[in-house]
Image: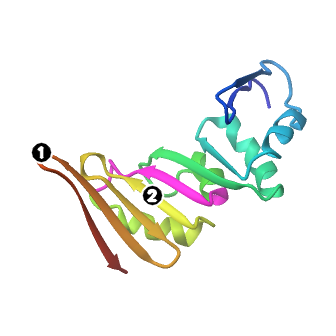
């Protein structure tokens, strides 16, 4: 793989920049960084998919943000969906996130699936088949509304 840029932020806020533009990746540097953690969070930038097998092999939990999906069968997002222990996505292109959450729980190893719903809040699905909707209202009285339903 070519053209990798990584910015890693440590626990004390010290960042490490790795620039491998134009060279094949040697994952030894990333493996050393990953060995110090138990969770990584990646988005769908293409080079991050190549870190997924390494993280899995090391027993590290993987959180992936696959952004706003248009269809469930999107080949570009397949590696991320198939490796995520925690999966985030935006359901902006769909009327209802629940069928998507159910499908992602069915086709991925994800233990938790979180759908951003814009101003409506978010929907969260668990392997236990509980779905929670968190809706934030920012009118004169600020409060949270939570609906829990069993599917």
Image quarter hosting the N terminus: top right
Q: Is residue 147 magenta?
A: no
Gap between marks 2 and 1, in whole Å? 25 Å
Q: Is residue 121 left or right of residue 2?
A: left
Point out the frontmost of discs 2 and 1.
1
Q: Are marks 2 and 1 in contact (CB under 8 Å)?
A: no
Instruction: Pick out the residue farthest to the left.
Output: 140
Q: Is residue 84 shown above or below 150?
A: above
Q: In percent of the image, x 75 and y 43: which residue is there? A: 51
Q: In percent of the image, x 72 and y 53: which residue is there? A: 38
Residue 124 circle label = none
Splitting the image into 4 quarters, where does residue 139 fall?
top left
Q: Which residues are magenta?
A: 82-94
Q: Is residue 137 left or right of residue 151?
A: left
Q: Secondary structure at mark 1?
A: loop
Which residue does the numbered mark 2 point to in the structure image?
A: 114
Q: In percent of the image, x 49 and y 61: which residue is there? A: 113
Q: Is residue 101 shown above or below 129?
A: above
Which residue does the numbered mark 1 point to in the structure image?
A: 139
């Amino acid at each position: 793989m070519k053209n990798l840029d990584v910015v890693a932020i440590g626990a004390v806020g010290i960042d490490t920049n790795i620039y491998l533009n134009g060279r094949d990746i040697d994952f030894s540097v990333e493996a050393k960084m990953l060995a110090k953690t138990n969770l990584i969070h990646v988005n769908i930038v293409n080079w991050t998919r190549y870190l997924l097998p390494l993280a899995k092999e090391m027993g590290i939990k993987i959180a992936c943000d696959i952004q706003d999906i248009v269809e469930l069968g999107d080949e570009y997002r397949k590696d991320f969906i198939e490796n995520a222990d925690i999966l985030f996505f935006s359901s902006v292109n769909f009327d209802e996130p629940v069928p998507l959450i159910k499908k992602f729980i069915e086709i991925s190893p994800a233990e938790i699936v979180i759908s951003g719903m814009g101003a409506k809040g978010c929907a969260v699905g668990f392997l236990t088949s509980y779905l929670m909707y968190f809706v934030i209202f920012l009118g004169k009285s600020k409060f949270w509304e939570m609906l829990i339903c069993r599917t």
